[in-house]
Amino acid sequence: IQEVSFKLEPAGTWMRPALRAMRMVMQEHGLRAEEIKKIDVYLHAPSQKLFAATKPTSYLDAQVSYLYLLAVTAHGIPMERWQEPGVFRSKALRDMIKRVELHPDEEAREDLYRELSVSPHRATGALTKVKVLARGREFAAQSRYGAGDPGDPATRVTDADLDRKFERFAAPLLGDKGQQAPHALWGLETRTTARELAAAFCRNGKK
């Protein structure tokens, strides 16, 4: 159970290391979306071919397009809004998508197949490199894991991370019960009853 990976973003598994690398570049250098001229992403070839939609038309497309997900990350759009039609249809996002290009990377391919070739034959990460052209120079970062993956202490999920995810994506659906649910969950071992847990997840508060 210590190897469980938590998705903290509404994004496909393969895309998450790219998003982390993009955030690293943006935050380290204080880049703004309007400064970005080009985003080059280097990754294993299967992802380059399968997940390169340039014009998402639904929330499903929005989850699995490298180009779109990097565009919303570059613009700093809150992740709880990534799947809103008004966001993925916006001109600013479409313009940013045109600046993103995916490239096959031999090191990333070797890294992936090395893991797949040995038991238990599954990938725990996906090495991805991001290079951003802005301010007349190139900024770069890379990541093998996404936020919430257990393979790196820097990406391993914390209780606070899970609370923030719940607050952003689930709490609004519960109305005034949204703040009670995490408290009930964390208390399951010591204080919360099944009745209290059910009530915390009921929007109208009935038991």
Image (cartoon, helix red, strand yellow):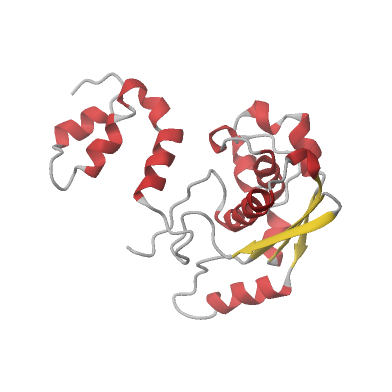
Point out residue 74 in the picture as x, y percentages from the top left corner: 69, 43
Point out residue 201 in the picture as x, y percentages from the top left corner: 28, 30
Point out residue 198 in the picture as x, y percentages from the top left corner: 22, 32
Q: Which residue is most to the right?
A: 136
**Residue under the point 69% across and 51% down:** 29
Depicted 170 relative to depicted 51: above or below: above
Could you tell me which quadrant the N terminus lies in? Answer: bottom left
**Residue 68 falls in image quadrant:** top right
**Residue 79 falls in image quadrant:** top right
**Residue under the point 63% across and 49% down:** 27
Q: Count numbered badges in the picture.
A: 0
**Residue under the point 82% across and 44% down:** 98
> On the rendered structure, is 176 left or right of 142?
left
Could you tell me which quadrant the C terminus lies in? Answer: top left
Q: Nearer the viewer, residue 106 or 145?
A: 145
Depicted 134 relative to depicted 141: above or below: above
**Residue 61 falls in image quadrant:** top right
Point out residue 142 in the picture as x, y percentages from the top left corner: 65, 63
Depicted 136 relative to depicted 191: above or below: below
Q: Nearer the viewer, residue 32 or 127?
A: 32
**Residue under the point 54% across and 57% down:** 146
